[in-house]
Image: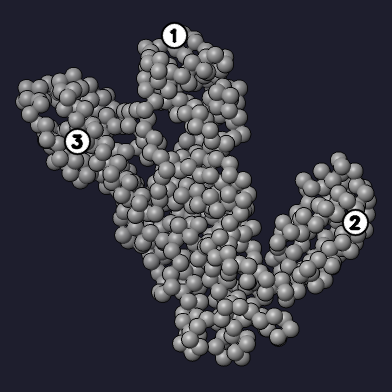
Amino acid sequence: MIKFFNQHIENFLVKESGYSKEDVILIKDKYKTEITDDLKKGHITTNIGLVSGSVTGTNPKEAAEALKKNLINLDGVDQIEVAGPGFLNIFLNRLYFVNLITDSLNAKKAYGTSNLGEGKKIQIEFVSANPTGPLHVGHGRGAAFGDALGRILEASGYEVSKEYYINDAGRQIDILTVSVLLRLFKCFEENSFPSSGYKGKYIIDISNEIDKKDCINENQLKTIISNLPSDPEEEIDALIRNFKNEAIELWEHTKNKSLNVVLGLIKEDLAAFKVDFNNWFYESSLGAVGDKDSKIYSAINQLEKSGQAYKEEGALWLNTENVGDDKNRVLIREDGRATYFAADVAYHKDKVDRGFDRLINVWGSDHHGYIKRIESSLEGLGFSKESLHVQLVQFANLFQGKEKIKMSTRSGKFFTLRDLMDEIGVDAARFYYLSKQADQHLDFDIELAKSQNKENLIYYIQYAHARICSLQNKYIELNDSLPTSIKSIEDGAYLACDKLIHEASKFPGVVERSAVALQPHLLVFYLRDLAHQFHSFYNDNPVLKESKENQESILQSLNLVRLVIANGLNLLGIDALEKM
């Protein structure tokens, strides 16, 4: 609908207004056409007169009046008002309402989709938690955000690839491995278990699956745990070195087993959370910096050739100050070892090489300082930093009553994402993670998420859908089947749901705005407002006491509302319930 009016407005600017080409370009960039929030201002409003006057130096009201004459005879237009300093408020006739309902219901699940993205390739990398333990509630927000964003972008015509980056080559995997081995051989009492190791029942469960105990003897074990540093981080690093030196075969076996078990837990939890990935990318696939065939060597070599990377004091540095970083960053240490940053650079080069038009990284807010570094590396690799969007996600604080739930993986005492799903359900968990802008602080209470009243917004929205289903079922009991069409205006069809239909007509625009802004919470806010309007209408209008003709048109109107709620919830990865 917006596109329909924009097309006619722009045709008028080009063909009939007498404006120069330069003026037309400026006007097209600045004017807006929107669905109104208040029906007193019509159904569509545009500031075209105001913008035209500002650009060309002409009277904005005269510009609006000229355009009004051009639009007034379009199908569906009832009247047009020139308001304020050059606004057009467009009122649509009943035929518009009938066609909107009919066309939308015929579109079914496709209502709300568009070709905004024109098939451009977008990669979204999200969650990417270290595979050192089950996902906790802090990871859930990024999971819900990335998945919902992928759904919205796909609905908006983009080709989306969702990816999980598996850090299987770093220190944290070594700490996981040594934690399992220490449990396997019961090297420490509970009160003396290394504080920097991973704890929790899952570590013990993994150790019980290791079947190569005979790869190491008692004397070797004594050597491994003797003369350890007092510093917790130095202690765990010494244990890692000692195990690798004494029993490398056992180490590799335990490492692979631990990684596979934890990844299996993560994949199971994400599947239950209705999150799927197109690709699971292993850090180890980047290779080693000394291997000329590796991806990490290729990335470093290209940065050196571009002049972005330089050698100083025996190390290789990346110039990140040129994009606003506080200092340049080390890629390769003096001893030839690659930094974590070097692996990230190689990973992003691999993304670029795969031909994506845009990259979206969903990171925790603690990664804020990393953005400039990655932007600098992309510039050095010949990829515009403008094609990278990093969405920082604040970890959610979860409360059970007044008690804040802990989220520490190391301690082994934390509330997992699986715990949350079992406690409040997948739909409620996803909804509350998505209920605010991702980079804003989020607290939500388990007790509220489980309540069945209008204060619980997910219940309120799902109940709106279930209420319409119940009303339709009652109608079927009385009339055998639902109405399939709305009678023409000449037959006296009555539409009592103007506000609801008007609100439902905003849905495609909300989806597009969510895609452009990369913010799924806009859809949450919209569904909340639509549900509120429906409940108010339902409470004030005993539908089945209306005349037969009015019942048919109202039910078709409510069928549109039901479709919008179902399609909107689906984009958030939430079920539209028929019974509650």
Residue visible at 54% across and 68% down in the picture: 563
Q: What residue is pinned by disc 2?
A: 63
Disc 3 on helix, strand or loop?
helix
Report which quarter residue 12 is drawn in: bottom right
Within 10 angstroms of label 2, few (less than 14), some, or many (20 or more) residues? many
Comparing labels 2 and 3, the label whose residue is closer to the camera: 2
Residue visible at 82% across and 47% down in the picture: 27
Where residue 410 appears, x then y in whole percent? Answer: 29, 39
Disc 2 on helix, strand or loop?
helix
Mark-to-mark CA distance, 3 and 1: 37 Å
Which of disc 1 and disc 3 is earlier in sequence? 3
Q: What residue is pinned by disc 1?
A: 314
Q: Is 271 rendered above or below residue 215?
A: below
Within 10 angstroms of label 3, few (less than 14), some, or many (20 or more) residues? many
Comparing labels 1 and 2, the label whose residue is closer to the camera: 2
Mark sitting on residue 180: 3
Where residue 138 appears, x then y in whole percent? Answer: 39, 47
Quick one: 470 or 3, which is closer to the camera? 3
Mark-to-mark CA distance, 2 and 3: 75 Å
Where residue 284 appears, x then y in whole percent? Answer: 35, 28
Residue visible at 55% across and 49% down in the picture: 153
Task: Please state, as top left, top right, bottom left or bottom right, where the N terminus lies in the image.
Answer: bottom right
Where residue 512 appears, x then y in whole percent? Answer: 62, 53
Q: Amino acid at mark 1?
A: Gly
Q: Amino acid at mark 3?
A: Val
Residue 531 can be seen in this image: no
Q: Is 289 rendered above or below residue 69?
A: above
Residue visible at 52% across and 18% down in the picture: 303
Disc 1 on helix, strand or loop?
loop
Quick one: 363 or 368, which is closer to the camera? 363
Mark-to-mark CA distance, 1 and 2: 68 Å
